[in-house]
Image (spheres, grey):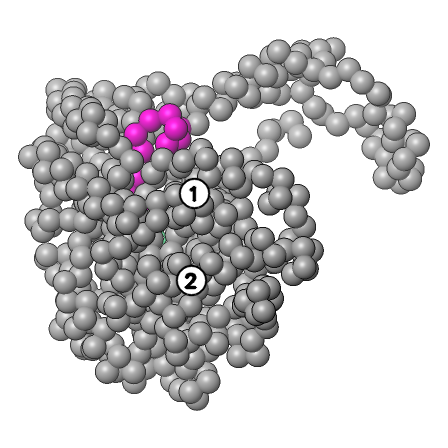
Amino acid sequence: MLLFEKSVSGRRAYSGPIAEKFSSKYAPAFLLRKNNPALPEISELDLLRHFTGLSAENFGVDSGFYPLGSCTMKYNPKITEKIARLADFTDTHPLAGSEALQGIMQIYHDFSLFLSELFGMAAFTLLPCAGAHGEYTGLKIIKKYFEKKGDDKRTVMLVPDSAHGTNPSSAHIAGFSIQQIKSKENGEIDLEDLKQHCSSDTAGIMLTNPNTLGIFESSILEIAEIVHKAGGLLYYDGANANAIMGKARIGDMGFDVCHLNLHKTFSTPHGMGGPGSGPVGVSAALKDFLPNPGIIKKNGKFHFTDNKQSIGHVHYALGNALVVVKAWYYARLLGKNGLKNVSEIAVLNANWLAKKLCSLLEKPVKNSVLHEFVLSARALKESHGISAYNIAKMLLDKNMHAPTIYFPLIVKEAIMIEPTETESLTTLKNFVRIMHEVIDEAKKNPEHAQHAPYNYSVQGIDEALAARKPVTCFKNI
Ligand SMILES: Cc1ncc(COP(=O)(O)O)c(C=O)c1O
């Protein structure tokens, strides 16, 4: 029920100075309202209950298991929140100038070096504010690189059919045209198809490794050689970096540009649209094109630098600085060995779960996986009319967040599961039990399953319509 619907004339949650008296004293007449705003009238207690109730309706990692594939919904240590909330960070004006920003500049400087070493890149910028923003920044760097070389014919970006939707979208917005590369049955890139698409128009390829099926591209060195030989560059979508930290380096795989999702891999909270951070790493040849400002250390002090060759600015001030602080602190807490351990456990958890669930639902790609895996409800749909969507909604009624569904697009009725390293064996066993329960119930009573969820305030909403034409305003306003 909306706050407006709970409104009872004359109820108040606040008693204090009357607004009109303030208005006439402090605001010019032409700014004053003619009529009172149509605000709900409600008591303080009812107001508190309303918002407490709403907060409990939101599902987060802190409330239950959240196996949303490709999103790395891991536990966000509360100590990092505490550090980011220190007044030294929160009370600093982003444009205060380098004298006043030495502390945060040191974090940016040191953390970029740390990421460069961990992932084998020459340099990182921490300015972009999301994965897709990182993609856009990285692609602009690729564009600038070819412009500088006078090679303006390279306008095509290759994107595998398993790619995340942001890859072709970012490439399009950055001014490239897109060509799709097929995957083979084992989920890896089809090298023959890649070779056929490589030409003097090729600007590069965008890949995530492990890919969105959770599978490591075993031919990555060959892929790099093919693309480089054709004159193109390799872009690494680092959304799946939770699988490789301390085990494989992006630069060593042959990539020239990459982004990371600090709001996934480095355990800063995300969801509901942000805030995020999508640092971009580059090889030595592309270093000068990184966005401004850069940060250097000279005579024991940190300075902002503006590089003339740079693609320019990609964000106001320093980007989402507090997200960077959280990620930096998380990396400091764990150190390189701890991060390596993160990836090992994330992979172990995913393989354990995949093994337990592949007798329940089809696993179209048979290879062992890294940090996530994809099942398919195709057979269940054909035999009982139960879709991936129905399973996802039934899980909500069991107090589990739904896995990612219908992605990647190359798997029919896809259910993509990423348990992450932060979940215990007990939670994983519980998830297996609940998946069995859900599918048993669905087979026994398909009609009931098709109308799940039952325990939420809304059922059977048109999600595409809600995303495309959101109604965010109460009718009476
Ligand atoms: C594989 C992959 N690439 C890119 C992105 C885009 O990241 P962001 O949502 O931070 O823009 C995502 C996000 O889910 C992803 O899973």
Find residue 60 and report its image quarter.
top left
Image coords of residue 204 (percent x, y): 32, 74
| 27 over 335 or under it: above or below | above
The residue carrying mark 2 is 113
Type of amino acid at the residue the image marks with label 2: Leu
x 30%, y 46%: residue = 338
Q: Which residues are magenta?
A: 59-71
SS majority, magenta: loop
Type of amino acid at the residue the image marks with label 1: Thr
x 41%, y 82%: residue = 146
Queried whether the magenta region covers residue 62, the answer comes back as: yes
In-front residue for pair 405/278: 278
Gap between marks 2 and 1 measured at Cα? 19 Å
The residue carrying mark 1 is 268
Furthest toward the bottom, the residue is 150
Q: Are marks 2 and 1 in contact (CB under 8 Å)?
A: no
